[in-house]
Amino acid sequence: MIETKRLLLRPLELSDEEDLLEYQSIPEVVRYIPWPERTPEQVHEALLKAISQNDVVNEGDWIVLAIVSKESKKVIGQLNLSIKNSVNKYGEFGYVINPKFSGVGYVHEACKALINWAFTVKDFNRLATCIDTRNLPSRKVSENLGMRLEATHIEDEMFKGEWTSSFVYAILKREWQEFNETD
């Protein structure tokens, strides 16, 4: 478990299902996420799959962590982290948040904690996130975390019936440490 001032980041649990459904079933929330708005059955199935992946050790491993508000004890979103290349200590991460809890810095706080954990506990050297170019709030989150825009891929994916473009943001462990020295 990872703890911040306002949040707990922990593995998902079966008891989280209702909180997950609350935001995973909203079309606008999943607009830039590679799954459709989910039914209760789909949330349950995805939850079981996520629970079965509980650590990042080997290439291809991934985890999903619940973002839990300490105040409400409610799951307000989730983070994912995967190992893309274990030899080069390279991973990718992403997130989704319940819109009822957006706009107050929870995403930044959760991502900052996840990145710090990945670099210090899991010894990653490089982390990246891929963002749909239409998703300007996520671009702002990446920039506020000290990540740099490395690439813009034009129409790189047929996504939900249309060609979309993506930004790739990344940060190295040493850059993260330098960026956070000023915090």
Image: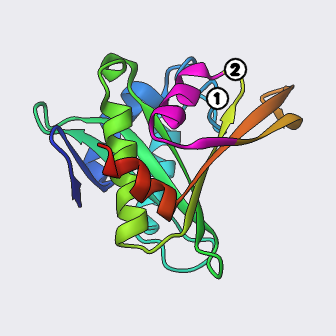
Residue neighbourhood size for the residue with mark 1, other residues' Cα within 10 Å, grouped as few (<14), some (14–19), many (≥20): some
Q: In this view, does 158 lie to the left or right of 142?
A: right
* Residue sitting at x 53%, y 22%: 137
Relative to 159, say whether 120 is above or below. Answer: below
Question: Which residue is at the front of the view, 50 or 40?
Answer: 50
What secondary structure do most residues of the magenta stretch adopt? helix
Amino acid type for the residue under numbered disc 1: Tyr
Question: Which residue is at the front of the view, 178 or 5?
Answer: 178
Residue 166 lies within the magenta run: no
In whole angstroms, how far apart are the C-alphas of marks 1 and 2? Answer: 8 Å
Q: Which residue is label 2 attached to?
A: 134
Query: Within the image, what quadrant is residue 51 found in?
Result: bottom left
x and y, in percent, of residue 95 in the image: 48, 40
Residue neighbourhood size for the residue with mark 2, other residues' Cα within 10 Å, grouped as few (<14), some (14–19), many (≥20): some
Q: Give the range drawn in magenta.
A: 135-149
Which quarter shows the C terminus?
A: top left
Q: How is the image coloured?
A: rainbow
Q: In this view, does 72 lie to the left or right of 153?
A: left
Q: Which residue lies furthest to the left in this view?
A: 71
Query: Within the image, what quadrant is residue 7 found in?
Result: top left
Q: Which residue is label 1 attached to?
A: 32
* Residue sitting at x 61%, y 52%: 128
Relative to 128, say whether 153 is above or below. Answer: above
Amino acid type for the residue under numbered disc 2: Arg
* Residue sitting at x 24%, y 41%: 68
Circles 1 and 2 in contact, beta carbons < 8 Å: yes
Question: Which residue is at the front of the view, 102 or 124?
Answer: 124
Residue 78 - label: none
